[in-house]
Image (tube, rainbow, N blue to C red):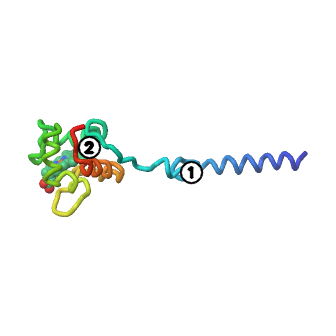
Amino acid sequence: MKRYILGILWVSTVMISSCYYDNEETLYPQVRTCVTDSMSYAGDILPILDNSCLSCHSAAANQGGVTIEGYTSVKTYVDNDLLLKSIKHESGVSPMPKNADQLDSCTIAKVEAWILQGALNN
Ligand code: HEC
């Protein structure tokens, strides 16, 4: 009986401590894969710009003389390569978002994929 109880204690200790590592990323790395198929301007890109850029680059804010509010304005910065270069922190271009962490790699991949898919107003 004593052995049995010790056994249960041991098993539950192991189970509880193993939970420490039970986060999605270590257990299921594939859950974190970045989906970049069929990017949509309205559904994927606009929310990124809204969250990270438009506080400074709305038509009203226009910081640095850069407006990326509205598809036509965004397309201008796609066509002159500055949008992608700025978020990828490429040399010769001011790194964006200014004074903040670089966007995470999946977010950057989404913007890049949308551009490669034709930067459609979709
Ligand atoms: C806190 C304000 C702020 C935020 C947020 C911000 N920018 Fe800027 N951005 C600026 C300023 C100011 C400039 C002018 C250049 C400079 O001062 O570095 C600029 C310049 C730029 C330029 C021109 C770069 C060049 O070298 O010609 C682009 C493109 C740009 N931003 C895109 C973005 C994008 C895309 C985001 C979001 C991911 C973003 N910015 C977020 C303030 C901001």
Q: Which residue is mark 2?
A: 52
Rendered residue at 69%/48% (across/down): 15
Closest to the observer, 9 or 28: 28
**Amino acid bearing label 2:** Ser
**Amino acid bearing label 1:** Leu
* Side of 5 where 67 appears, left or right: left
Residue 31 in the image: x percent, y percent?
49, 47
Rendered residue at 24%/53% (across/down): 87
The mark nearer the N terminus, 2 or 1, is: 1
Helix, strand or loop for disc 2: helix
- Queried on whether the Cβ of the residue with tag 2 lies below 8 angstroms from ligand 1, the answer reads yes
**Quadrant occupied by the C terminus:** top left
Above or below — where is 51 with respect to 17? above
* Side of 75 where 23 appears, left or right: right
Q: Which residue is mark 1?
A: 27
Residue 1 in the image: x percent, y percent?
90, 45
The residues tagged by marks 2 and 1 sit, at their Cα atoms, a distance apart of 30 Å
Q: Residues within 10 Å of mark 2 (few under 14, many from 20)?
A: some
Rendered residue at 35%/47% (across/down): 36
Closest to the observer, 26 or 84: 84
